[in-house]
Amino acid sequence: MGAPLLEIENLRTYFHSRSKRAFIRAVDGVTMVIARGETLSVVGESGSGKSVTALSIMGLLDAGPGVISGKITFRTDGGERNLLHDLEHYVTLGEQDGRIMEVSKDEAGWRKQVERIMAEVRGKEIAMIFQNPKSALNPFVTVGHQITEAIRLHTPTKHPREAKERSLYWLERVKMDSPRLRFDNYPYGLSGGMCQRAMIAMALSSEPALLIADEPTTGLDATIQSTIVGLLAELKSELGIATLLISHDIRVVSRLADDVAVMYGGTVVEYGPAPEILGARFGLKHPYTAALLASRPSAQNVEEKGGLPAIEGEVPDPIDVPRGCRFYARCNRVTEDIRDACARHEPALKELTPGHHVRCWLYGD
Amino acid sequence: MILEVTNLRKHYRQRAGIFPALRSRERFIPAVDGVSFCLEEHETVGLVGESGCGKTTIGRAILRLTPATSGRIVFDGHDITAMSARELRPLRSQMQMIFQDLDAALNPKMRVRAILAEAITTHHRLSDGEVARRIGELLEQVNLKASKLSNFPRELAGGEKRRVGIARALAVGAHFIVADEPTSALDVSIQAQVVNLLRDLQRQLGLSYLFISHDLEVVQLISRRVAVMYLGKIVEMGLADRIARAARHPYTHLLWSALVEGQSKEASHAPLNTRTGAWEPFDFERPVSGCRFAPRCPVYEARGRPAVCTDAATEPQLHDIGGRHYVAGHFPV
Amino acid sequence: MKRYSQTTGEVGESSDLSPWKTADALDLVYVGYGLLIVVLVLVSYVLGAFTWLPYDPEQIRVDLLNAPPGSAGHLLGTDFLGRDILSRLIVGIQAYFLPGLLAIVISLLLGTTLGALAGYRSGEVETLVTYFNNLVDSFPRLVLILLVIAAFKPGIYYIMVVVGVTGVPAVASLIAGKIEFLAQKNFIEAAHVLGLPSRVILLKHILWHHCMPLLVIQATIGMGEAILIETSLSYLGFGVQEPTPSWGNMVQAGANYFFQGKFWPSTAPALSILFTILGFHLLGDGLNGILEGSAGK
Ligand SMILES: Nc1ncnc2c1ncn2[C@@H]1O[C@H](COP(=O)(O)OP(=O)(O)OP(=O)(O)O)[C@@H](O)[C@H]1O
Ligand SMILES: Nc1ncnc2c1ncn2[C@@H]1O[C@H](COP(=O)(O)OP(=O)(O)O)[C@@H](O)[C@H]1O
Ligand code: SF4
Ligand code: SF4
Ligand SMILES: [Mg+2]
Ligand SMILES: [Mg+2]
């Protein structure tokens, strides 16, 4: 693993639901490291907190009173900074009987502080592409103009003509067909696949150190999905940009990731090198990862037309997070020795082999 | 033979412009354009294809949710293509649909109990006790907790909504079900539960499914035969394993090679998958003559754009190539 | 082929709660006030109907002409003939209550029927309904009513029939819009697939489950308008005639003494009109914000 670029330590992002007087624990203790030039993939079911993690990094969360705690260290050549620096000063919690009854947040101060930290980072050092490219692009501005603007804003290239040349270069780079033609298109004239290419071009054009891709292929058709994944793979090997790739699709992840973090119920339950986590050996894995991998049709059960080994039950409610292991209610590997621990205490993330962390009582105490 | 569809066409009329009254600006979208297939008892036929190629439209036409433009639909020996709503009603108890959109499929103002009770009493007059017994039976069949009966749909998790939808289809006693993307809106772990449920129900109750999906692996797992659609037409149809392993149509080939490519890390460059930029989805407005797949077809390109492919007079038709395998194309690979 | 919806951004809490719990505070105040007015009107209507009144509303007291509020047990004072204003206000409700209900019933029944026809059966019927709606809509209401009065010199009930009919287009277009919106929803299609007759689907799934709030809202607004029209007409002398009290003719009769410093005979009914109409309108508005606002989101 290369030198760390972004380190997330124990990130917690809670939204507060006024009507239920409770926290929605969207992200609840996420720890992971993205190394320079490598791709870290976050996999997990919907609602497991993948997108909120990404938005927390980008400082793009502004809905309602919420709390973010932990540490996100971003290291560039210019030094290192904590992207959550001092944010805790803007929130006060009113507690009653150990339950948080009330949150007051200095929204304006919070936002100002976030903008102060992120101004130098967002779009420049860290760029992001979204699941729905159509809604992320401005519908009233041509694709080419949007990319040109991004280049002039974030890179030393300021001259309009040079910036245009540069954006054409990036459109070509992402294999947009007839880039000169598409340059003057408005987003609605482009198909989903082309929009996603334009988004990628725009994100890359500022030559960021880190690219966050939140479900970049999810809304697209199977055939188009595979070309976008191919494009990302190519760009990865050519440009060597560190990437945080969020996806629920294990096939996409297995093609692109160097490291994988598996999220469940707002927390990382397993985290390590991709071959170890996604590989066929089910022995040293978190029970959830193993079950998730098994629940997709494999060559074998397609052959036999057998049933799928499903995980029974549903994902936990982020408002009412179980006290012990979050996966306990659905876990099929609880043994009598650890049942008590599983039910009552949340296991810690433990390093099994170098770089491979698992959060499960099965592995050590 | 429980279902026989012959040359089904559905052309949606779209009125363009601000003045709907000016009919001259009308356009037709040939969402389904001459599709024939059949379904035997206890069989699952998978219907795959890209978004917007007309899969849902076929399902809706079969259930007469939308009138077919032309063609013939024979269900259980009855020609239902032009039946009146009244004549159709008794047959409704035998054919049902599971809807693609989880949230829109259940009336948000009705509790689960009312939804199921309504379905149960649609075709049979039953006493309250019998209805309750039947609801209990259904819950057991779809593996849903009885405590969910008094919930509104919005209070259910995705998998539970899906189970209610399935229970409703079973409640009337259907033995043919159009399952429109029953797993696509669900989480990975729940998808497997639903696939298993559908398979178990099929075995227990002898159901037949038209299984619409774009998840090729699931389709391959659950169906005996698969039909591949492109732009309103079936381009290839055959036993699931043959479609997956010995596809003859260039489009089917591409679909499955995209899948294989996704599975292995070193992108296996399938010989066909060479044209980048040729990947944009079709649209119904681009006029086509001859083979609809030609603008994206690598074989067409590799063969130096042969004229037969784009000649309207020689539009490829499905033909039998043996072993219940049908392909529409001039140059099967 | 939207697989996973992006939850972030749309706070998930509003959808899984009853609209009353997440309602805007102002809307709740509106509804609270409106309900208070409705209750007052209902109670007064019953009191008037059984003539459980402090005084006989038509009893003339020459010794107490325009007596100020509070004098000799007359809570709101007396009018220019010494009649008790409070009793007359209570009885004045008789002038609009049943006629108003008639207007509401007509506009809701006809409006729902036409709206359902237009929404459910497109084509000729829809065009016909649209023409009818446009025709009725294109006349200013009051002008139409005055024309009818000039032509037929009718009683208040006939006038309210006109009011009801002119209220039809608004209801019809709302219902038709709702039906068109719902018809594309899968659960309506699912009901068809189940084999439920269209009539049941229309009545149960569409009207009962999804149009009730709309109809209640329209009813409250309709009542407000009926009151406005009845009182305006009575004020102008076309509606309820002296000595039978109506808030409108009370204002008119009292107005003559307003500038002599005897403000109460006209102000009391005028404020009653104001607060009552406001109450019905705010009730409709608040209900609309709470029930329809969240459903439309
Ligand atoms: N009511 C309608 N009016 C006009 N066009 C329609 C209508 N319904 C569907 N279409 C069009 O018909 C085509 C086929 O639609 P259909 O819903 O059958 O696709 P599908 O294969 O089910 O796609 P998906 O995978 O997205 O569900 C699309 O181009 C769609 O836009
Ligand atoms: N703005 C918000 N307000 C309240 N809850 C939210 C918000 N955004 C996300 N959540 C909740 O946080 C949890 C994690 O969401 P998300 O990160 O979007 O999941 P995913 O892993 O699918 O990307 C979900 O339960 C979601 O409902
Ligand atoms: S800690 Fe226990 S319940 Fe949790 S995953 Fe491990 S074995 Fe299962
Ligand atoms: S008929 Fe021609 S264009 Fe069509 S799929 Fe076959 S080779 Fe390709
Ligand atoms: Mg997400
Ligand atoms: Mg569909």
Image (cartoon, helix red, strand yellow):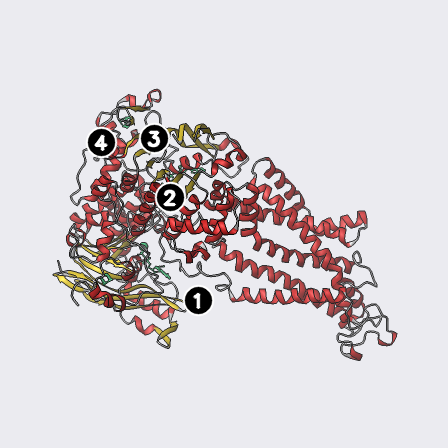
Q: Amino acid at mark 1?
A: Ser
Spatial separation of the CA atoms under disc 3 and disc 2: 29 Å
Give the x, y percent position of residue C16.
44, 59
Spatial separation of the CA atoms under disc 4 and disc 2: 38 Å
Nearest to the eye among marks 4 and 2: give it: 4
Q: Quadrant of the N terminus of chain A?
A: bottom left
Instruction: Give yes or no for contact between labels 3 and 2 (Cβ–Cβ under 8 Å).
Output: no
Instruction: Give yes or no for contact between labels 2 and 1 (Cβ–Cβ under 8 Å).
Output: no
Asked which secondary structure carries label 1, the reply is loop
In what quadrant does ligand 2 lie?
bottom left
Asked which quadrant contains residue A188, the reply is: top left
Q: Nearer the viewer, residue C288 or B130?
A: B130
Which numbered circle lies on residue A188?
A: 2
Q: Please give the name of the residue rendered at 86% of the width and 71% of the height, measured from the top-left corner.
A: C60
Which numbered circle lies on residue A19?
A: 1
Give the x, y percent position of residue A187.
36, 45
Instruction: Give yes or no for contact between labels 4 and 2 (Cβ–Cβ under 8 Å).
Output: no
Tag 4: Cα neighbours inside 10 Å, few (<14), some, or many (≥20)? some
Q: Amino acid at mark 3?
A: Ile
Residue linked to disc 3: B234
